[in-house]
Image: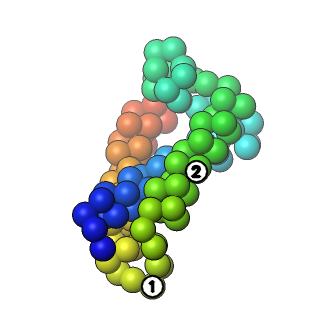
Amino acid sequence: MRWYHYLSYFFGGAFLSNTLPHLVSGVTGHPFQSPFAHPSGVGLSSATVNVWWGLFNLVIAYLLVCRVGNFDLRKNQHVLPFAIGFIAMSLLAAKAFGRFYGGL
């Protein structure tokens, strides 16, 4: 496996993790922070904007994981960078959004 496969799988995991809060908030009809809010990342965006942002993140995750290299869920060398990216983004999101929702 080439070095850029590791990088691609890491960021694929990060983008997939970022998909979840935006897509869930949007589908349930709740506003949520997004890069398109004012101020960016602090203000709330509409549920529709969050659905689109979540879907965009999902497409990027798909491209990074499924279209780069030959990702195999049964190979630890493939899953490990993906999982590290997913966990890293999840923890960063928990810290960033926790200050707004009392989850520090």
Is 33 placed above or below 6 here?
above
Image quadrant in which the N terminus is located = bottom left
Q: Nearer the viewer, residue 19 or 78?
A: 78
Q: Image check: 6 left or right of 46?
A: left
> Which numbered circle lies on residue 74?
1
Q: Quadrant of residue 77?
A: bottom left
Visible residue check, residue 2: yes
Q: Name the residue located 31 percent from the left edge and 64 percent from the top edge.
A: 6
Give the residue pinned by disc 2.
58
Question: Residue at coordinates 37% horizontally, 74% vertically from top-left?
Answer: 78
- Give the image's coloring scheme: rainbow
Quick one: 68 or 12, which is closer to the camera?
68
Q: Is residue 46 above or below residue 87?
A: above
Which of the two discs, 2 and 1, labels the residue nearer the N terminus? 2
**60 up-or-down from 101: above or below:** below
Q: In the image as oriented, which residue stretches furthest toward the top?
A: 38
Q: Amino acid at mark 1?
A: Arg
Which residue is depicted at the point 38% across and 37% down? 96
Secondary structure at badge 2 equals helix
